[in-house]
Image (cartoon, rainbow, N blue to C red):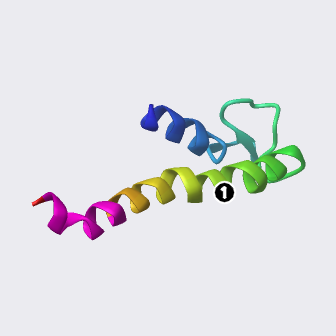
């Protein structure tokens, strides 16, 4: 489940260059970093990247590290 969600979040940033235009790979009608894509990338993509992709694993490692004496 984690890798599926991570793939979905990262797909917001997956753009490809076609005929000197940067287009979103999932929907080639959307131009990257302009209009609705910029709103989605900054409003959804970056916060979810920070919280879900990096935050949850770092928090889990921190909890394990702080409780390592209790487990062993």
Q: Is the residue 66 above or below the residue 24 in the image?
A: below
Q: Which residue is mark 1?
A: 46
Within the image, what quadrant is residue 36 found in? top right
Q: Secondary structure at mark 1?
A: helix
Q: Is residue 71 left or right of residue 56?
A: left
Residue 27 at x, y percent in the picture: 74, 30
Residue drawn at x 58%, y 36% as measured from the top left: 8
Residue stretch rendered in magenta on the structure: 62-71
Q: Residue at x 86, y 52 (%)?
A: 34
Question: Measuring 81% from the left and 37% from the top, which residue is drawn there?
Answer: 30
Q: Nearer the viewer, residue 8 or 72?
A: 72
Relative horizontal placement of residue 29, taking residue 8 as reference (left or right): right
Q: Is residue 11 visible?
A: yes
- The crowd level at tag 1 (other Cα within 10 Å; few <14, some 14-19, many 20+) is some
Residue 50 located within the stretch drawn in magenta:
no
* Residue 61 location (% of width, % of height): 32, 61
Q: Position of residue 28 (x, y in %)?
A: 75, 31
Secondary structure mostly seen in magenta is: helix
In this view, the residue farthest toward the right is: 35
Q: Between 42 and 18, which is closer to the camera in this rendering?
A: 42
């Amino acid at each position: 489940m984690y890798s599926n969600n991570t793939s979905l979040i990262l797909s917001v940033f997956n753009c490809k260059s076609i005929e000197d235009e940067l287009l979103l790979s999932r929907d080639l009608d959307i131009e990257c970093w302009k209009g609705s894509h910029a709103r989605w990338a900054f409003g959804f993509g970056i916060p979810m990247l920070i919280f879900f992709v990096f935050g949850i694993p770092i928090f889990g490692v921190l909890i394990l590290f702080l409780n390592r004496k209790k487990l062993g």
